[in-house]
Amino acid sequence: MPIPVGMAPAALGDAARWVESTRPPDNREIRFRWKFQNDREGSLAGRGRIRLALPDSVRLDAAGPLGLHSSAAVVVGDTALWGEPEQDVQKLVPNYQLFWAMLGIARLPRGTEAARHFADGTLAAWQFSLGQDTVEYIRENGTVPRLIAEVRQNGQRLGRVETKFGPDGFPTSSRLMVPRPASKLELTFYQNVKARPFAPDTWTRPAPGDR
């Protein structure tokens, strides 16, 4: 992570306000293409759909070609209410801060004890810590704005996300890198629109054969 020199202690209230500023202004319906690679399983690709309800609820559906390798999950904040199948969802959601960062959204980890901050007009950097666990964000402005997030647990890197934004402020692409096992998940967003009211069964675990 290119954490800048000059990080200073910051109030958790200020950190929470910055995190809230990264959310979209309304509920979203998002479509994307995905590609997953690791040394054990090779490469898989497909398409997916995200239904985002503010402030922090997501219904995720993903499938490979011809509907193979389909999976679905509902995430609320830092909790997966359900996932089908769970092992496939774990690849897409290895950590909740990383998951939300792939949507261009930062999150203040539950139980955060301290925050540090730096801003100079071209970027804003934040570090949130709980013991030896840290979550670091950099939000860069520029021709192609981007959000970089890195999560460490017990001092060891769990994963890193780089998400790029278009002129409208919504993500255009995202890449998750996980070191153990070495894996890469890439998302390319091709639709991001204001959502109509979601049906109540959006958040319900699908019956077998309905995914």
Image (spheres, helix red, strand yellow):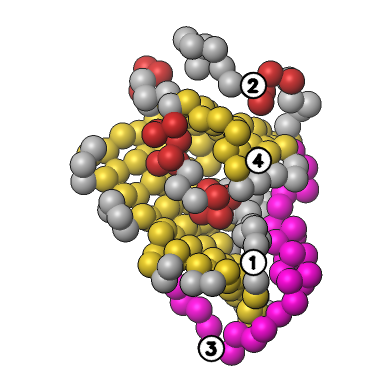
Identity, as a three-letter code, of the amino acid under mark 2: Thr
Q: Decide which of tag 3 and tag 1 comes sooner along the chain.
A: 3
Q: Which residue is mark 3?
A: 5
Is residue 181 something one can see in this rendering? yes
Instruction: Tell me the SS state at disc 3.
Output: loop
- The front one of 122 and 133 is 133
Badge 1 vs badge 2, beta-carbon distance below 8 Å:
no
- Mark nearest the camera among 1 and 2 is 1
Q: Which contiguous range is marked in magenta? A: 1-27
Instruction: Tell me the SS state at disc 4.
Output: strand
- The front one of 169 and 154 is 154
Number of marks in the rendered image: 4
Identity, as a three-letter code, of the amino acid under mark 4: Val
Q: How many residues crowd mark 2 within 10 Å: few (<14), some (14–19), many (20+)?
A: few
- Mark nearest the camera among 3 and 1 is 1
**Picture coordinates of residue 165 (x, y %)?**
58, 55
Q: CA distance from mark 4 to mark 3?
A: 34 Å
Identity, as a three-letter code, of the amino acid under mark 1: Thr
Asked whether 174 falls inside the magenta stretch, the response is: no
Q: Decide which of tag 1 and tag 4 comes sooner along the chain.
A: 4
Q: Which residue is mark 4?
A: 76
Q: Decide which of tag 4 and tag 3 comes sooner along the chain.
A: 3
Instruction: Tell me the SS state at disc 1.
Output: loop
Q: Is residue 60 above or below residue 118?
A: above
Q: Which residue is mark 1?
A: 112
Q: How many residues crowd mark 3 within 10 Å: few (<14), some (14–19), many (20+)?
A: few
Q: Which residue is mark 2?
A: 204
Asked whether 20 falls inside the magenta stretch, the response is: yes
Q: Is 126 on the left-hand or right-hand side of 33? A: right
Q: Within the image, what quadrant is residue 105 found in?
A: bottom right
Identity, as a three-letter code, of the amino acid under mark 3: Val
